[in-house]
Image: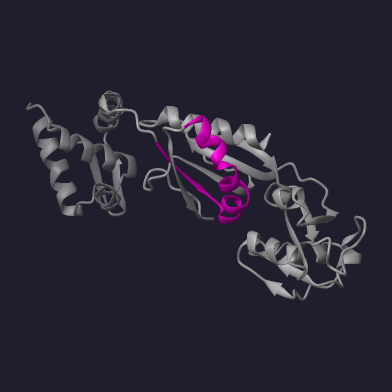
């Protein structure tokens, strides 16, 4: 029995996790043949059969399953030890919805930079689900239901708290809060979430014919502030414009506790864990 090569052990770990040479090859950025050859070489070095080759993939032999359990732990120890040698990074990359970025995060960011001058914050404005294994992102904020990924730490920042807003200077702006029925015949502004189309039919009202449609909530709110109609948005996004008097709240939805804004990040923070934790804690405090 010869001591196996570390590269072969990494390929064995990938093949064992996927039970598929093709998927292991994609993860390692190699050809399927190269992975299969590495596993054959490893089996030859160890003089054992690690996998049964089946028509639809792989299955463990009894020895292979036991070996992978030990190998995966060993590789994790090597990876953690290597990371400890790397200097602490002060760069934090956070992915957030575009409207959350423009209406909430960016206006407040100078406060964070003032107390964390050594930290470099990089913002990725995106609505898409973040893949922390393949994307260079440390944390993400997402809107909707609670994320289900159990490999992530999840922090609830705020409820969705949908409200309807318009300019207080618009001639059609109600003086007080009113019902959806009262708003249905007024100029309505849709964003990418299309809340008007969901809410009005729930009240037995016809689907709205929006006067304006935007793909971003921030643009819909800007149009509402300019007197072009009434937009629906989460309170967290519209709060700044309400606070400055650009918008007035004219309708409030009953709270749905399961919907909201969530900050997520991998359970194990690595090279920039101190800087990342500082940003995460600050965002949570600001939302509170």
Residue at left offset 38%, top offset 45%: 136
The answer to whether residue 170 is left or right of residue 226 is: right
Could one spot residue 164 in this view of the protein?
Answer: yes
**In the displayed structure, would residue 278 be above or below residue 137?**
above
Residue 182 appears at what percent x and percent y? 91, 65
Q: Find residue 162 and report its horizontal and vertical position in percent.
A: 76, 52
The majority secondary structure of the magenta stretch comes to: helix
Residue at point 55%, 42% (across, down): 109
Is 51 or 146 nearer to us in this picture? 146
Q: 9 left or right of 219?
A: left
- Identify the image quadrant of the N terminus: top left
Which region is colored magenta? 91-116
Determine if the magenta segment contains residue 96. Answer: yes
Residue 40's x, y, as percent? 13, 42
Up-down relation of residue 78 to residue 147 (above or below): above
Q: Residue at x 35, y 31 (%)?
A: 271
Q: State left or right for residue 118 relative to residue 54.
A: right
Residue at horizontal 63%, vertical 52%? 103
276 in relation to 228, above or below: above
Count of numbered tags: 0
Query: Which residue is farthest left?
Result: 2
Q: Is-magenta flag for residue 206? A: no
């Amino acid at each position: 029995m010869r001591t196996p090569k570390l590269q072969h052990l990494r390929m064995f770990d990938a093949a064992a996790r996927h039970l598929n040479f093709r998927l292991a090859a994609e993860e390692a950025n190699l050809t399927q043949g190269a992975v299969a050859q590495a596993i054959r070489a490893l089996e030859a070095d160890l003089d054992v059969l690690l996998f049964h080759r089946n028509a639809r993939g792989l299955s463990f032999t009894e020895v292979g399953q036991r070996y992978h359990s030990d190998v995966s732990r060993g590789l994790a120890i090597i990876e953690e030890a290597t990371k400890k040698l790397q200097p602490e990074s002060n760069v934090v990359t956070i992915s957030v919805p575009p409207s959350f970025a423009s209406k909430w995060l960016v206006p407040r960011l100078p406060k964070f930079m003032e107390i964390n001058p050594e930290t470099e914050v990089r913002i990725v404005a995106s609505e898409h689900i973040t893949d922390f294994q393949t994307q260079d992102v440390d944390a993400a904020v997402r809107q909707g239901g609670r994320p289900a990924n159990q490999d992530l730490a999840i922090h609830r920042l705020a409820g969705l708290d949908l409200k309807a807003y318009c300019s207080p200077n618009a001639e059609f702006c109600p003086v007080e809060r009113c019902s959806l029925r009262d708003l249905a015949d007024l100029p309505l502004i849709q964003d990418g979430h299309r809340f008007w189309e969901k809410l009005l039919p729930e009240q037995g009202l016809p689907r709205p014919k929006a006067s304006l449609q935007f793909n971003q909530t921030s643009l819909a709110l800007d149009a509402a502030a300019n007197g072009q109609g009434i937009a629906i948005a989460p309170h967290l996004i519209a709060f700044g414009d309400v606070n400055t008097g650009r918008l007035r709240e004219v309708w409030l939805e009953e709270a749905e506790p399961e919907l909201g804004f969530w900050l997520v990040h991998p359970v194990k923070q690595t090279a920039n864990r101190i800087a990342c934790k500082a940003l995460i804690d600050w965002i949570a405090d600001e939302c509170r």
